[in-house]
Amino acid sequence: MPHLADTQAIAYLTDRTPSTIRTWARRYPDLMPRRGTSTHNRALYDVEEAELIAALLDHGGNSRRTVQH
């Protein structure tokens, strides 16, 4: 069963900004699909999927801060 977290938590866990997480969700919908909505009306994502994207982007030579768009 996936571990779900909202945009804010994913941002904290991956050391990115919430806007970067929203960008990833738009750019990579197959890798990081929305998994529902929190009680605070925030989008929920699978933590492992978000960490995978972070690792792939880091491995690709992008710094954590230049990934933001």
Image: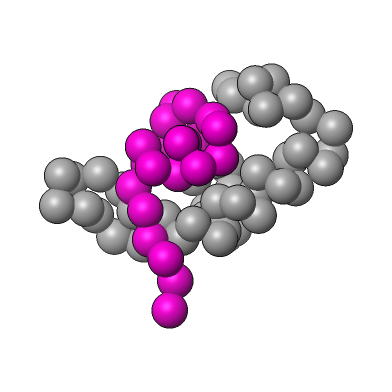
Measuring 24% from the left and 54% from the top, which residue is drawn there?
A: 37
Judge from the rendering whether residue 6 lies leftward or rightward of residue 52; answer left or right. left
Measuring 56% from the left and 40% from the top, which residue is drawn there?
A: 14
Q: Is residue 67 above or below residue 11?
A: above
| Residue 28 % position (x, y) | 59, 49
Instruction: Give the quadrant of residue 64.
Output: top right
The total of numbered circles placed on residues is: 0
User: Can the viewer see residue 34?
Assistant: no
Magenta range is: 1-22
Q: Is residue 51 above or below residue 67?
A: below
Instruction: Give the quadrant of residue 4.
Output: bottom left
Front one among 30 and 60: 60
Coloration of the structure image? one colour
User: Can the viewer see residue 39?
Assistant: yes
Q: Is residue 23 magenta?
A: no
| Residue 1 % position (x, y) | 43, 79
Q: Is residue 64 above or below residue 54?
A: above
Q: Is residue 11 magenta?
A: yes
Instruction: Give the quadrant of residue 57.
Output: top right
Tell me the quadrant of the picture where the C terminus can be found: top right
The extreme left residue here reads 39
| Residue 6 % position (x, y) | 34, 47
Judge from the rendering whether residue 7 lies leftward or rightward of residue 65; answer left or right. left
Front one among 52 and 31: 52
